[in-house]
Image: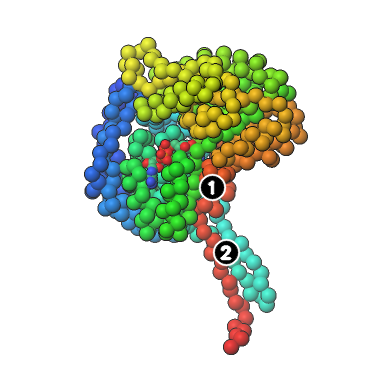
Amino acid sequence: MLSNAFLRRTPARIAAAMSFSTGTFSNSQPLNFRGGARLQPVDGTQKEEAFEPATGRVIATFTCSGAKEVDLAIQNAKQAFKIWSQKSGSERGRVLLEAARIIRERENEIAALETINNGKSIFEAKIDVYTSWQCLEYSAGLAGNLSGQHVQLPGGSFAYTRREPLGVCVGIGAWNYPFQIACWKSGPALACGNAMVFKPSPFTPLSVLLLAEIFAEAGVPPGLFNVVQGGASTGELLCKHPDVAKVSFTGSVPTGSKIMEMAAHGIKPITLELGGKSPLIIFSDCVLENAVKGAMMGNFLTQGEVCCNGTRVFVQREILDKFTEEVVKRTKKIKIGDPLLEDTRMGPLINGPHLQKVLGFIKKAKEEGVKVLCGGELYTPDDPKLKDGYFMTPCVLGNCRDDMTCVKEEIFGPVMSILPFDTEEEVLERANNTIYGLAGGVFTRDIQRAHRVVAGLQAGVCFINNYNMGPVELPFGGYKKSGFGRENGQVVVEYYSQLKTVCVEMGDVESVF
Ligand SMILES: NC(=O)c1ccc[n+]([C@@H]2O[C@H](COP(=O)([O-])OP(=O)(O)OC[C@H]3O[C@@H](n4cnc5c(N)ncnc54)[C@H](O)[C@@H]3O)[C@@H](O)[C@H]2O)c1
């Protein structure tokens, strides 16, 4: 997700000095964080390796946390919650502002680590860091504004509501936006007075440790924000723990469904930020140049590994050829390569199995009759140190039909499917014919049609004449199987707090007995 404000920054600021280079990083520090410090987990048997996708090198090994370590992290969070929840919103806000300031100060280091471990270009990783500290600043504002309601009752009696924190919240993250996801969950959670135990994806365990250190430096009580590492089994230990008050999850639909089952046993509220297969509808009266740019932004950020991407690009038949020609021309020009170089716009995919999965979708699409208009192949950059990286060429598919696998399923790679349409009524029905409902977009100069179409889209986040912009002031989240609950925007406090109603009697008790 992008921020307009970031894109308007001066190139000099973006190209700030870097001290990392691809193929050199190796982690030597513990990757769990508990009680205010990095440490090794006290238990856990399974070992995991994390990779640098650009080179295929192992850059970190760690033990997946077991039941004892998970419990210790939660007990630490419980203790810190007692202190943090008693502070005023403004006091909490000040700490979050300081954390935001430190993130800005360490922007290059955080972005570089994200690029090394995730593979996205450094240009994009800096955008992620930008939206991360913005979220903490925004959450700081929310903290100072938390309040209840005062309601007058008969006879001078009255009632008031208190917005109270939930307790220990668990955050479970996906690998595509590791630092940003951790900030988007912890910012509002801490603002509302909660503590958090966060588990990143085992593919991207590194950058969240910087966030934990930054929170500690900014002044959160030790234990307020903890990190446990691991995969499904560690995640399940967190979700099933009786002292956890809420789970906020970002990941795939099948895992989201399991999280919901586990939460059901404990009657725990959850936020689910899940996958998507979003429609991007381009009418023939659009500004073609903007529609082409929108389709590129809606498909190729972070190697296409973006939940809200508009991967089903519906194009009105009159402009199909012109649009397709322009998109293909620009897709072929995307600079693929060393993600730490400032002019690279597409890095490697997250890992070998995922790369093979994406290529498998393209193979199947060919069997089902699509025309590969460009890309969709393994790519080996000239630089020898990148020869084992997980690179592929961004791909545009033509001759697509709604019933094809590549059009129905989330590919989570740089693959755009182009689908012709004729009428507004037809395209809206086809756009909504999916289990997902995360996002959707429309390009048209007709203002009435733009609003009519987005009103008809079954999606939580809609764009008119742009795509994939994500300012932190706006709620983000899905409809249908893309999940529920919202991140960001003022509404986020609903998902990290609970409301207490207090009735105050000013007269005598009237009893019916
Ligand atoms: N809607 C959003 O905001 C958003 C944002 C980013 C990614 N996503 C989605 O995430 C998916 C890609 O991420 P992924 O491959 O990491 O997803 P995933 O579901 O495989 O894993 C997500 C997280 O859940 C953990 N996990 C796996 N099994 C678990 C279990 N049984 N119990 C508890 N935790 C478990 C993983 O270790 C990881 O930390 C895509 O579908 C993408 O669309 C959604």
Say whether residue 98 is visible. no
The residue at label 2 has a CB less than 8 Å from ligand 1: no
Q: Ligand 1 is located in which of the four quadrants?
A: top left
Classify mark 2: residues with Cα within 10 Å, few (<14), some (14-19) or many (20+): some
Q: Position of residue 171 (x, y in %)?
A: 42, 47
Give how far apart the Cα atoms at labels 1 and 2 are: 25 Å
Question: Seen in the image, is 356 located left or right of residue 151?
Answer: left
Of callouts 1 and 2, the N-terminal one: 2
291 in relation to 256, above or below: above
Q: Please identify the quadrant where the C terminus is shown.
A: bottom right
In the image, is residue 432 above or below residue 498?
above
Tally of numbered tags: 2
Front residue of 491/192: it is: 491
Q: Amino acid at mark 2?
A: Thr
Determine which of the numbered discs, if any, sits on residue 484 in the image. Answer: 1
Q: Which residue is mark 2?
A: 161
> Is 237 or 126 nearer to us in this picture?
237
Q: Nearer the viewer, mark 1 or mark 2?
A: 1
Binning the other alpha carbons within 10 Å of mark 1 as few (below 14), some (14 to 19) or many (20 upward) gives some
